[in-house]
Image (spheres, grey):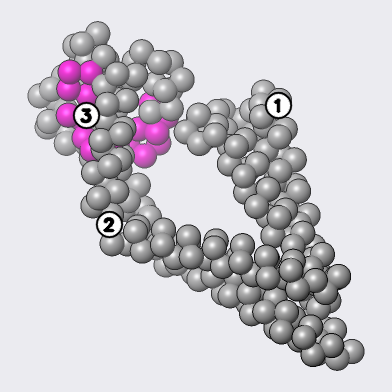
Amino acid sequence: MGCFTFIKVMMILFNLAIFLGGGALLGVGIWVKVDGQSFLNIFGTLSTSILQVVNVAYLLIVIGAILLVIGFLGCYGAQKESKCLLIMFFSVVLIIFIVEVAAAVVALVFTGLAETLLTGLVTPLLKNKYGEDPAFTEIWNLTMSEVHCCGLNNYTDFDDSYFYKTHNSYPRQCCGDKVDICNRTQAAEMAVTGCFPQILQEIRTNAGVAGGVAAGIAALEIAAMAVSMYLYCRLDEK
């Protein structure tokens, strides 16, 4: 078996795996969208908050569809030795790679800006929907209890909020879950940190693992682009 044939076979098998994985994710996404209750029954109450925070169905459908396209272009393009499909595969992976690099740069350089934007988006929701929208309230209660945090930044996120005006108090998580009614003085004394700093600190703590995973994915993408370009160029010699 020559080098060209070996790389071609590896390209086909690798992208076939991607294609099948994308199909599985797409199928699960459609299942969650059509019959979300079964998903909740299987994966428990935690999945309820996950489904509310991130629309898992649409996320899985999008990721699955992208993987299907990539897997098809790479697998079929290598099998049929199609220069058109191979260059399309290269282009799609390159676009995804550029987007990932740009997102990483933005996350590293503009963390403060991201915090400002997030605060501007989430704080009004906390003020208007917490205590009024049962699903939204349940999500934040679960998050604040599990992470041991209060609001996005701190208890002041609930100042002049629907919840404060209705109960004349802050969520009990703002006092460390130690009281039933959390007033301003107690919240200030407890100084429970916001959820965003806690989550950000967790991300920084696990930055090595996240960076390793990201580097591995980037390496696979570069390898896929290199292999597709190798096959593309060798086709001119055949």
Image location (x, y in percent) of residue 184: 13, 22
The residue sitting at the top extreme is: 166
The circle drawn on residue 110 is 2
The picture quadrant where one finds residue 166 is top left
Q: Which residue is drawn at 60% across and 37% down?
A: 58
Identify the residue under disc 3.
Answer: 157
Identified by mark 1, the residue type is Val
Q: Does the magenta stretch include residue 150?
A: yes
Identified by mark 2, the residue type is Phe
- The local crowd at label 1, few if under 14, some if 14 to 19, many if 20 or more residues have their Cα within 10 Å, is few
Identified by mark 3, the residue type is Asp
Q: How far apart are marks 3 and 1 (CA)?
A: 36 Å
The picture quadrant where one finds residue 150 is top left
Image location (x, y in percent) of residue 49: 50, 30
The residue stretch that appears in magenta: 141-161
Identify the residue under disc 1.
Answer: 34
**N-term mark: 3 or 2:** 2
Image location (x, y in percent) of residue 120: 25, 35
Query: From this viewpoint, is residue 155 visible?
Result: yes
Q: Nearer the viewer, residue 104 or 95?
A: 95
Against 103, residue 223 (above or below) is below
**N-term mark: 3 or 1:** 1
Q: Are marks 3 and 1 in contact (CB under 8 Å)?
A: no
Q: Is residue 74 magenta?
A: no
